[in-house]
Structures are given as C-alpha cells and as structure tokens.
Image (cartoon, rainbow, N blue to C red):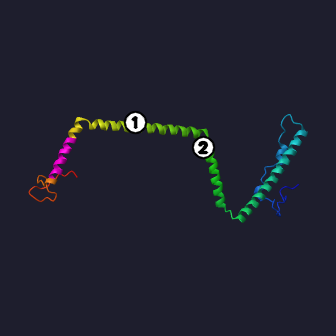
Amino acid sequence: MDSAGQDINLNSPNKGLLSDSMTDVPVDTAVAAQTPAVEGLSEAEEEELRAELAKVEEEIVTLRQVLAAKERHCGELKRKLGLSVPALCYMKTSEKLGEWNEKVTQSDLYKKTQETLSQAGQKTSAALSTMGSAISRKLGDMRNSATFKSFEDRVGTIKSKVVGGIENGSDNLPSPTGSGDKPLPDHTPF
C-alpha cells in the first residue's frame, strides 16, 4: 500500500494528501538492514520485529495524514464560523493561563511561600504596632519632662504677649508695614 499518495476520505476529495513537509518519517530500510541484530534474537524474530517496525512507521505516516486533514477541516470550520486566529489565540492563552494559575496556586511551594509571607506580614504589623506604642510613650514622657514644660511655658508667654498685644492695641510690637520709628529687623527667619 502506497501511504504517501493515500487518500483518506473525510467527506472531501484528496483531503488525506499531505504536503511534502508532513512526510518526513525517518525510515531508512537500507540502514536498518545493515544494523546488527541484538544478541539473543533469531533471524526469524529479527525479521518479525523489522516487519512490525515498518508497519508502525506506515501507521505513523497515515496518522499524520489524517491529522493534517482534520486540522485543515477544523480551519475551514473556524473560518466559516468567523473565529479568527487572534480570538482563538486569546481563548487558548487565557485558558492556559487559568490552568497554569490553578497549578501554581495548588503547588506546595506556592502554599509554603504564601504561609511564610503571611507570617512575615503579621510579624511586621506587630513590630510596627509595638514601635508606634513606644514612640507614643516616649512622646508622652517627653511632654511630661521639665524641659518640655519650660519650653511650653515660654511659648505660652510669647503667645499671650502677641495675642494680648494685638487685642489691646499695644505698640510694643513692630509694624508689619515698617511705619513708625522702629524699623523691621533684617534677620527674619523665613
């Protein structure tokens, strides 16, 4: 039976014919005949194996032809249904990504990594909470210190002079416009 020119009937004439690229089956009977038999095989067993090998290789060629015909038929059906190549690629890619994501999330490595990161997050959160409490406590201690009380008293005194001077119309403060006898100082901090 000549498998290279074989017509596989799939409801279409010549559907089973392959292009030249699909007939590449590495079969070299001359080399196979020259290869020495494995020790322990009789000539009859060797001939039987070679015949079976030839039959399997012929079946491979036939199956490739059938596959090529089905792929062409599938392409025709997709074209008739309006399924474009980019849409099909997108569908296949998203399906593969979903499968990959499921495999990854079910893996032991992913689960261990997720658990480790979760524990690290909890420990970091606890450390930041402890640090915030410590800072709060230190600020409270600092506010109750004598130095801070002295600073707070001075700020309060200055504030009362400034607010009191404005409310009472005091002339002890320099004028913002520079009018009057007292000029504004040159060393403004801003």
Give the residue at x 91% y 40%: 44
Give the residue at x 80% y 56%: 66
Range drawn in magenta: 152-165
Q: Position of residue 73 (x, y in %)?
A: 76, 61
**Quarter of the image containing the N terminus?**
bottom right
* Picture layout, residue 64 above or below residue 32: below
Relative depth, front residue between 73 and 123: 123
> Dot 2 corresponds to which residue?
105
Q: Left or right of 86: which side holds 175?
A: left
Q: Is residue 164 among what the camera can see?
A: yes
* Picture layout, residue 166 above or below residue 149: below
Q: Left or right of 81: which side holds 58?
A: right
> Dot 1 corresponds to which residue?
130
* Picture layout, residue 131 above or below residue 7: above
Which structural element holds mark 2?
helix
Q: Position of residue 104 (x, y in %)?
A: 61, 44
* Picture layout, residue 29 above or below residue 39: below
